[in-house]
Image (spheres, grey):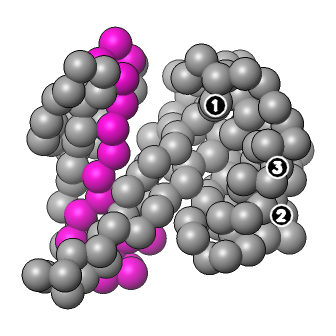
Amino acid sequence: MQIKRITAAESSLVTDLFNNYRIFYKQASDILLAQQFIQKRLDNNESIIFAALNDKDEPIGFTQLYPIYSSVRAVKNWLLNDLYVDADHRKQGVGEQLIKTALQFAKEDGANYVELSTAIDNYTAQSLYEQIGFERQSVDSEFYTYRIKVV
């Protein structure tokens, strides 16, 4: 498995995965919308996307990070907003490697922390995040928020 940061020219690598991610969160399938959304984020340098590729260079997972700015601390942190692994490749360390790559990127970028949210009934994700070292920060009616320091 290889984890790589994708460029705008490689956006098609994660289009299907992003569409499946949206379906997982009960959105209607829309490949065109998925393609346009990912392309725009990369074209405008609004997000960082890492893709996990199998031995045949086929995409099997991705994560997307968005910057979070703190005016008081004058620092850019990162929101790990999207993480998705194809169902046939789960429980094989793909998600963990994507997260660890994102954390290393954030650290090298000078961030203090990475934050993420997950559904309160997504026990598998919660277990992974806590195993990696994320700490639960807050809860609302649908999501837990987690944070990990990277400094």
| Image: magenta residue range | 104-122
The answer to whether one can see residue 7 in this image is: no
Asked if residue 151 can be seen in this view, the reply is yes
Quarter of the C terminus within the rendering: bottom left
Amino acid type, residue under disc 2 in the picture: Glu
Q: Residues within 10 Å of mark 1 (few under 14, many from 20)?
A: many
| Residue beneath disc 3 | 35
N-term-proximal mark, 1 vs 2: 2
Image point (63%, 31%), residue name: 21
Would residue 123 be found to the left or right of residue 51 on screen?
A: left
75 in relation to 66, above or below: below
Give the secondary structure at mark 2: helix
Q: Which residue is mark 1?
A: 21
Quadrant of the rendered image containing residue 17: top right
Identified by mark 1, the residue type is Tyr
Q: Is 139 in front, or is 51?
A: 139
SS for dot 3: helix
Q: CA distance from mark 1 to mark 3?
A: 13 Å
- Residue name at image x 29 percent, y 27 percent: 143
Read off the residue under disc 2: 10
Q: Position of residue 20 (x, y in %)?
A: 71, 28
Q: Nearer the viewer, mark 2 or mark 3?
A: 3
- Image location (x, y in percent) of residue 126: 30, 26
The three-letter amino acid code for the residue at tag 3 is Gln
> Does the CB distance between marks 2 and 3 fall below 8 Å?
no
C-alpha separation, residue under disc 2 versus residue under disc 3: 11 Å
